Image: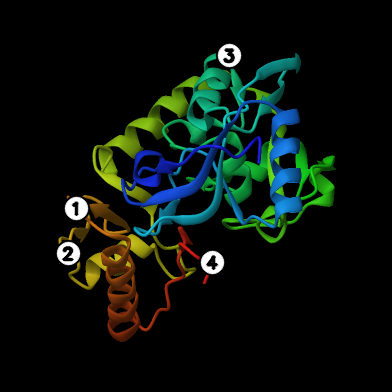
Amino acid sequence: MQQLSSSRLLSEVCTFGIGGPAQYFVEVRDIPQMQKVLQECSTAGIRYFILGKGSNCLFDSRGFQGAVLQNKIDFCSETSPGVFHVGAGYSFSLLGTQTAKQGWSGLEFASGIPATVGGAVFMNAGAQGMQTWEALTFVDYVDADGVLKRFSKEELSYSYRFSSFQRMQGAIVGVCFTLTPSQGARERQIQLLKARIDTQPYQEKSAGCVFKNPTCAAAALLIDRCGLKGYRIGGAKVSEIHANFLINSGGATSQDVLDLRTYVKDVVLQKMDVTLESEIYWISADGR
């Protein structure tokens, strides 16, 4: 158990500010360390969860039985003009800002998204009609047995808020993006960031958008039309700024959030005849 030696309160490492103690908690700084940790988990039969910035997940208030591995592999290099090889723990928002400043287009939408590069690829994060996979070239991945692999874009499947990695056991450790030159990249990045700040509860504790947007209309619009802005259960509340955000207004438990998410989903189905699908990951204490 050499690699797995410490515990951590999960409310301290996620944007929701909710979560009990992890049995084990490891900050992974490089690829060899990730290989060793995953090998150890596999050998010992320890359940694990790969954590980035904790911006799209809800941890159980009871904690996590197993190992939470926070990916902090944060290298970034431009290997050729417009081609960036980046560690999975690198800030996705920072990458979007840096590349746009240099006149490269493809990741302007990333600015302001509180995710790691690995998390963005895993979820196929996107905004304003743009998605992460579109700029992807290849992904470096460590499987559950600690074996390092490289997948080209063509070997992977992507759709709205989905990637092949959601069905795999292991961890993204590196990503290569190929971007295109654009004189307007910086201006677009600034406009997208401003729109995000103006329309989202940026200063509140949340996990971002709770529901995926159905084809008929934006989830936030449907929730708003049901009059649910400001509705609360315990310490969890529907944001009054953006209805598709559930916020921790103070002392919220994971059960508060789960109950509020279910309530919102039920009301939208009843009033709008639309079934909303959750976008955030629920990580239970015992895997059930």
Foreground of the two, 27 or 205: 27
Q: Give above or below for 58 relative to 94.
A: below
Residue occupied by mark 1: 251
Secondary element at image label 2? loop
Disc with the residue nearer the chain's start (3 vs 2): 3
Q: Give me the C-alpha separation between circle 3 and circle 1.
A: 42 Å
The amino acid sitting under disc 4 is Gly
Whether residue 225 sits left or right of residue 191 in the image: it is left
Judge whether residue 184 can be spotted in this image: no
Tell me what residue is drawn at x 72 percent, y 55 percent. 169
Residue occupied by mark 2: 234
Q: Give above or below for 276 relative to 11.
A: below
Foreground of the two, 186 or 47: 47
Residue occupied by mark 3: 102
Judge whether residue 59 can be spotted in this image: yes
Q: Residues within 10 Å of mark 4 (few under 14, many from 20)?
A: few
Depth check, mark 4 against mark 2: the one in front is 4
Disc with the residue nearer the chain's start (4 vs 3): 3
Q: Give above or below for 171 relative to 97.
A: below
Callout 2 touching callout 1 (CB < 8 Å): yes
Residue occupied by mark 4: 287
Q: Give me the C-alpha separation between circle 3 and circle 2.
A: 46 Å
Foreground of the two, 20 or 247: 20
